[in-house]
Image (cartoon, grey):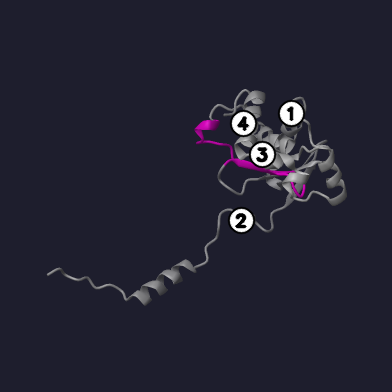
Amino acid sequence: MAARGKGLPLPILVAACLGALSIPRPTGAQVPPDEPWRTLETEHFRIAFPAPLEDLARRLGHRAEAAWVLLSRELPPPKRGKVDVALSDHVDFPNGFARIYPSNRIYIYAPPPMDLLELAFMDEWLELVMIHELVHIFHLDHTGPVGEFLRRVMGRVPLHWLFFPQAASPIWLAEGMAVHYESALTGAGR
């Protein structure tokens, strides 16, 4: 005969698990509510950043304007408004992403890539990520006369086919373009 182990009754086990899961824990990615934020404006960008990152934000402003000049030779730039950029160090991984509505926006996480092999041969992280994300803005914001007219009349409504026809591009095309230009214009990239 096999020995049968005695364990906790199921209701007590479930209650203990639920109790353990309900203990509040701080999350590492939250923005401190009392952190002072600043804004730096350049010709084409508005950069928001936590005050301790001011030196990095100024460097990003220079890299962003240089990226604008380089990409303007290759792709049609957005027609109106500044690109809003948020620079943050509230996460522990390098990344960035771009959005085209309700306005052109780029988010950049400040930590440089230390353990990503695909980014090991880069000149500078800020330059690379800025070019990559700005390609998305240039590409996805582009529209024809009908889309431009609709944007002026109705604003930047997220209807891809009418207002942002390039946003209906497959993800491999958008990412492929960004990787191509980040590599071609920096001599690094992926």
Residue annotated with mark 2: 30
> Closer to us: mark 4 or mark 2?
4
Q: Earlier in the sequence, mark 4 or mark 1?
A: 1
Residue annotated with mark 4: 179
Q: Earlier in the sequence, mark 1 or mark 2?
A: 2
The picture places residue 97, in percent across and down from the top left corner, at 65, 43
Front residue of this view, candidates 70 and 58: 70
Quarter in which the C terminus is drawn: top right
> Closer to us: mark 1 or mark 3?
3
> How many residues crowd around disc 4 within 10 Å: few (fewer than 14), some, or many (20 or more)?
some
For the question of whether residue 110 can be seen, the reply is no
* Amino acid type at mark 2: Gln
How many marks overall?
A: 4
At x 70% / y 34%, what residue is drawn? 135
Image height of 41 relative to 4, above or below: above
The picture places residue 34, in percent across and down from the top left corner, at 69, 58
Residue annotated with mark 1: 71
Determine the CA span between mark 4 and mark 2.
30 Å
Q: Earlier in the sequence, mark 1 or mark 3?
A: 1
**Quadrant hosting residue 12:** bottom left
Front residue of this view, candidates 150 and 184: 150
The picture places residue 71, in percent across and down from the top left corner, at 74, 28
Give the extent of the magenta segment.
Answer: 94-119
Image height of 184 relative to 86, above or below: above
The image's mark for residue 20 is none
Q: Earlier in the sequence, mark 4 or mark 2?
A: 2
The image's mark for residue 169 is 3
* Amino acid type at mark 4: Val
Front residue of this view, candidates 52 and 143: 143
